[in-house]
Amino acid sequence: GTYETGLAPRLVQGLSGIVFDRFTVGHSHTCAAQKGGGRLFCWGANQHGQLGDGTTQDAQLPIELFADAITGGQGGGAGQGGAGGGAGMPASWNGIQSAGSFHTCATLERDDRHETYCWGSNQFGQLGQPASQGPNPTPVRVNDEVSVIDGFDRFDRVFAGGGHTCARGGGDVKPVYCWGKNDFGQLGDSTTASRHEPVRVNVPKVDTVYTGLDHTCVAVPAPSGNVTLSCWGRNDAG
């Protein structure tokens, strides 16, 4: 609730009576999901719209992003009280969210299926929209149909990095798709061309994905029960 540098842990204000079980932090902003409640709150820096409330004003106190205001149209969405493109049934956040440097992504559930949304900076297409469209201060739908076209389930988890985003497809195969900034090959598509459309990464079934500033790693379960780690992208520090 202040702009003073915190030299010791302190309680976040404005969240009295709400229990959270998932948190994510970006460069200068934070988001948290209510435990089992389908609610999502963000606060902090907002110069690129990374709080998703339809403004670029910083917030000292948590702001709620209302899932039922998001209509579910491909390439459209809404933030706090906004309106997006397409029709859809009421939805709720499912607690899967990830903050990148200056953008944020999350998944919600509507009619028993997942939908993936991102908001904030879009300098490299990390929102799943052409970079020429610029930043978006309200959630926009990512083209998760690409996973369905490839024969997999929709994305069930999303991971925001420095200027890129990755998602894991649902079902048994659990494929990985990435999009956005790619100057160091962090998308894993054997190129350095940034792209706004999700592209599948050639890795086996994964457990989870880790997105850094300019690199990406995945944890791959082995038949022995162990887990192997594969990484790609920037490597100037090893």
Image (cartoon, helix red, strand yellow):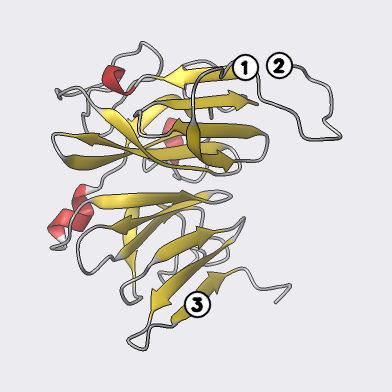
User: Image point 13% across, 34% down: which residue?
Assistant: 111
Residue kind at label 1, given as amino acid type: Leu
Residue ID for mark 3: 229
Q: Quick one: label 2 or label 3, which is nearer the N terminus? A: 2
Q: The N terminus lies in which quarter of the figure?
A: top right
Q: Amino acid at mark 3?
A: Leu
**Residue annotated with mark 2:** 1
Front-most of residues 130 and 29? 29
Return the residue at label 1: 61
User: How far apart are the two marked residues, 2 and 3, measured between alpha carbons?
Assistant: 39 Å
What's the residue at 32%, 24% (across, down)? 67
| Residue 13 visible within the image | yes
Q: Are marks 1 and 2 in contact (CB under 8 Å)?
A: yes
Apparent side of residue 235 relative to residue 84 in the rendered image (left or right):
right
Is residue 73 shown above or below 64? Answer: below
Q: Measure the C-alpha gap from mark 3 to mark 1.
A: 38 Å
Q: Indicate which disc residue 156 carries.
A: none
Q: Position of residue 230 (x, y in %)?
A: 49, 77
> Would residue 236 be found to the left or right of residue 173 on screen?
right
Q: Secondary structure at mark 2?
A: loop
Percent of width and height locating residue 82: 35, 13
Give the crowd class for mark 1: few <14, some 14-19, many >=20 residues within 10 Å. Answer: some
Q: As shown in the figure, which amino acid type bears the numbered disc 2?
A: Gly
Q: Nearer the viewer, mark 2 or mark 3?
A: 2
Q: Residue at x 49, y 33 (%)?
A: 20
